[in-house]
Image: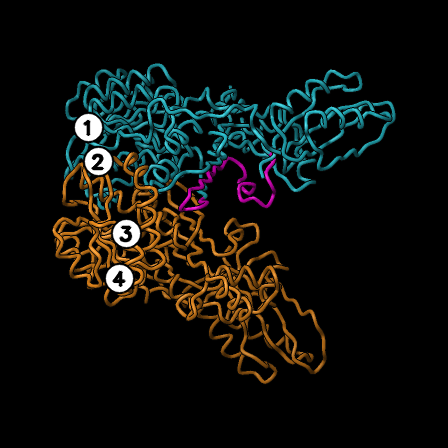
Chain colours: A orange, B cyan
Amino acid sequence: MKTVKIGLIGLGIVGGGVYEAIRDNGKMISRRAGVSLEIAAVCDKDEKLLKKAAAGKSVLRTQSAGDVMKRKDIDVIVELIGGVGAAKNIIISALRHKKHVVTANKALLSEHWKEIFSVASENRMFVNFEASVGGAIPIIRAIRQSFVANNIERIYGILNGTTNFILSSMSESGCSFNDALKMAQEKGIAESNPELDISGKDSAHKLAILSLLGFGQDISPADVYTEGITGIKPEDINNAKRWGYSVKLLAIAKNDRGGLQLRVHPTLLKSSHILSDVRGADNAVLVKGDLADESILFGKGAGREPTASSVVSDIVEIAKHIAFAGRENPVEYRLNYSPGKRNISRIEDLKVPFYLKFSVIDKPGVLASISSILAKYRISIATVAQEERREGEAVPVIILTHVAKEGNMREAIKKIDKMEYITAKTVVLRIEE
Amino acid sequence: MKTVKIGLIGLGIVGGGVYEAIRDNGKMISRRAGVSLEIAAVCDKDEKLLKKAAAGKSVLRTQSAGDVMKRKDIDVIVELIGGVGAAKNIIISALRHKKHVVTANKALLSEHWKEIFSVASENRMFVNFEASVGGAIPIIRAIRQSFVANNIERIYGILNGTTNFILSSMSESGCSFNDALKMAQEKGIAESNPELDISGKDSAHKLAILSLLGFGQDISPADVYTEGITGIKPEDINNAKRWGYSVKLLAIAKNDRGGLQLRVHPTLLKSSHILSDVRGADNAVLVKGDLADESILFGKGAGREPTASSVVSDIVEIAKHIAFAGRENPVEYRLNYSPGKRNISRIEDLKVPFYLKFSVIDKPGVLASISSILAKYRISIATVAQEERREGEAVPVIILTHVAKEGNMREAIKKIDKMEYITAKTVVLRIEE
């Protein structure tokens, strides 16, 4: 049985998981794949991790990725250090050294995919990246292979476990954003610096990758309109619930006549929608194609073993190719991407229903002036609720609108927020139907 | 760009869908795959379908599969006639003629996989069968490729759309099994002879295929303990609901210390379980692996376009292989299967909680005698409910038990059903926790 040799760069949470998965499940994997996997080199800056990981004698242990590249017998480089600096150099260098690449690095891929895949293509090497989106969920393979015959109409995803955990906790216990974030940090679900997650940027990176694959356009994360969840208050989640909605940080890509919408923002989603059932740190992706209709893939979006599961599946795909078809990859570096094709619609042209929470001084005529400004911008009201009445004091007024144009909404809210009876910035959330 | 030629055998619902998918989405598929698909021959007994399907001049139209085999330029045979007779001959003949095979035929594969894959292996041809389980849901690829590094612990599936539609309808409208079946037939969801679906056999075929792939054992549909849904009454669904359960026809494969459980039967599943949300004719499969943990794949389990979506993805996989790696398939005929390995546990050894509905003459002491028989077989009661009281008349008594052994339960119920105050066969349903 052919043995394929792997250089594992980065021995942190995921790298350690990959090491253990191959060590513990390696025999079974060989039996299934018909090819044997061997970790021939491990690389990390952290000497303790190096010592711990590589117990076998024949394994190269090094703090320098360059040492791994020099090893001619290594077929596949697994990059798991993350970040867009050193990781990029490692991947490019590996491809130039005619080594296939497996990575889970969504930030890097979403920003630099064009360069990376161009070098991969020149060198006829694989770059596999199943673990970059949705952890253990096989969404990359599903879009690239299983739905290959479909015109993709939309991709909806809960792509970030941290924010889903925070929103789920706020919904279940009524706690504040800060308390939920603290809980997530205590459980190791949020990092000490949670910015990338709570800002929605991590979701935008992942949506950019899925959209690139699904829609074949020249997409970067900057094309994704992105709002985070820091402004969400428990009362917004409660109000949403009362009307039968959950609040989710949804990553949405929708291809319709107006162009391709790419957006990540807190979204009111019908409680009966199956994505509303995604709780805690789980992830889920809905894909709608013209043939397959709606498919939904749920699972663990992060974590040591789930991510390792996808990384190893990527290694196996390459290993089988090497063992049975040859050292080079003639086809899989192809992305479904038409150079220069861009049909991305502006967020101002988005048409959705909205949830609005106004903070107003409760006095006669206030609702009438709000409504008349909304009407001026052709925003029609579906429901109004004002629970508390305290004449002369600030109270919340909730309005759900019918479908309205984002650009109009922005203009209307700008006007409304300048009015004297408005005591705080209006909360504007989009509803997905 | 290389063109791969296809012989399409069977032009019914799915075959027609495949024809149209390649006709309508062919250009996009080529752009994505880097290889062009051409339907070079169509074959069906029905002349009308033949005439309708093949408008192009260069397409061979024939009523005889043998004519398609003779065509040396055809690389892939797509078998979509169904059944286990002619279909088997076509597949074996195609493989011997060195043609790769794509099929959606679960009855045939689950019964004859050993012979089919042995001929495929001799001839180094692919047999792809993504559409055989779960329609558009990429569950075969997920188990074979994406979860390749996992020890699979369990596979739970709602694998039959017809029975899920019937049970959903009964639950939503309170109608009888017969009325729900009639509705399904009117909507084209059930066939005029629904036996294969409602008996659970179709689910058993599919579970056998998934289990073969997931657990690598020598499994046939006869190894799957199978109960259908014809005995389910609306009141059972209502009773289940009251205690927070839905009733689903679940296909369950669970690998634990006692062996591999393989069973298809109506199951009480917590309403909060995500599989309880699978309504209508949709399908879903939950896979739990030691690394990936639980993943769930939802989608359209049947139908013209969803099935075509999977069939074409199988063709594309083969076409890419032919175009870029060569005419023969050196690896993909491997199934994850250890010859002779069988560790299938007997249904009598199953340990689950049960739902029991007794029909009893309502008189003092009846519950005491039932309980004492159950106690004798070490079956302990979790909840008892007797809604109606009509002294001396037949009333239903519902008991939910704690975990009990199936063998004991069968003995106990045999005894109880012989007692004079029992007016009808006791309804026994298993609960999945």
Discs 3, 2: same chain? no
Residue A292 seen in render: yes
* Residue bearing the label numbered 2: B319
What's the residue type where badge 4 is placed? Answer: Asp
- Which dot marks residue A44? 4
Residue under numbered circle 1: B75
**Percent from the top left, x then y, of residue A226?**
40, 67
Q: Disc number at residue A312?
A: none
Q: CA distance from mark 3 to mark 4?
A: 15 Å
Q: Which mark is in front, 3 or 2?
A: 3
Label 3 and label 2: CA atoms lie apart by 43 Å
Label 4: chain? Answer: A
Is residue A89 inside the magenta stretch? no
Q: Can you see residue A343?
A: no
In this picture, is A304 found above or below B50? below
In the picture, residue B365 is in which quadrant? top right
Label 4: element kind: loop
Element at badge 2?
helix
Report the side of A89 relative to A159 (left or right).
left
Q: Residues within 10 Å of mark 4 (few under 14, many from 20)?
A: many
Confirm whether circles 1 and 3 share one chain.
no
Q: Which residue is mark 3?
A: A55
